[in-house]
Amino acid sequence: MKLHWSPRSPFVRKVMVAAQELGLADRITTIRTVAAMNTPNAALLEDNPLSKIPTLVLEDGTVLYDSLTICEYLDHLAGGRLFPAAGAARWQALTWQSLGNGFLDALILWRNEREKPVERQTQAWMDAFAVKTGKTLDRLESETSALDAAPFNIGHVTLGCALSYLDFRFADLDWRAGHPKLAAWHAAIRARPSFQATEAVDG
């Protein structure tokens, strides 16, 4: 399998963490791919018309888009370990995954806005991203016990990657100060070999 990959993308990292957890990392060949929002990548467009990563190309040429689909496909290959099969556990895991993905979407947009010259920033957007981030962290702080109690699943993978991206791109926020239980949960997640093997780097 071929994965369009970047060492900085949290969504790519989510896929790689899942692959590590499922014992499939050695079956994936990573292809360094730049997917800038304002510059479609000609090579990537051949596999994904949206020019977005992660994009996974299977051995038979089938192409899978988006971390949601790719992670579920990898879980299927491994016999189903990160996605609970049914019932409340499944809906909880998928909800945590959706929260983590949405959190990452907001953080990426916020980072893009913060990188603009001050005179070009939209303050209302900046304020909205800050509010959403604070509320997400508060919600996760209140759900730490549930996260601890649940078997490790795709929700843990996604939320762990989101909090690590917060560290990577928003070190100035000091989010741990008001969220001690979540900070402890994230420290435990970061210590897993799958997270240690996939740390984001600028490059």
Image: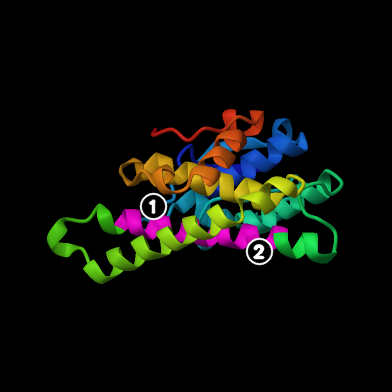
Magenta-drawn stretch contains 202: no
Q: Amino acid at mark 1?
A: Ala
Relative to 26, say whether 16 is above or below. below
Relative to 189, say whether 178 is above or below. below
Instruction: State the residue position of label 2.
Output: 95
Relative to 77, say whether 48 is above or below. below
Q: Is residue 199 left or right of residue 73?
A: left
- Give the dominant element type of the magenta stretch: helix, strand or loop: helix
Looking at the image, which is closer to me, 92 or 97? 92
Magenta stretch bounds: 93-112
Magenta-drawn stretch contains 95: yes
Tell me the element at label 2. helix
Counting from the top left corner in percent of width and height, residue 35 is at 44, 50
Q: Quadrant of the C terminus?
A: top left
Q: Is residue 134 left or right of residue 162?
A: left
Res. 60 in view = no
The quarter holding residue 47 reads: bottom right
Counting from the top left corner in percent of width and height, residue 62 is at 72, 55
Counting from the top left corner in percent of width and height, residue 161 is at 55, 45
Quick check: marks 2 and 1 in contact, CB under 8 Å? no
Q: Quadrant of the N terminus?
A: top right
Looking at the image, which is closer to me, 151 or 124? 151
The quarter holding residue 98 reads: bottom right
Q: Residue at x 42, y 64 (%)?
A: 132
Q: Residue at x 66, y 63 (%)?
A: 95
Q: Which mark is residue 184?
A: none
Tell me the element at label 1. loop
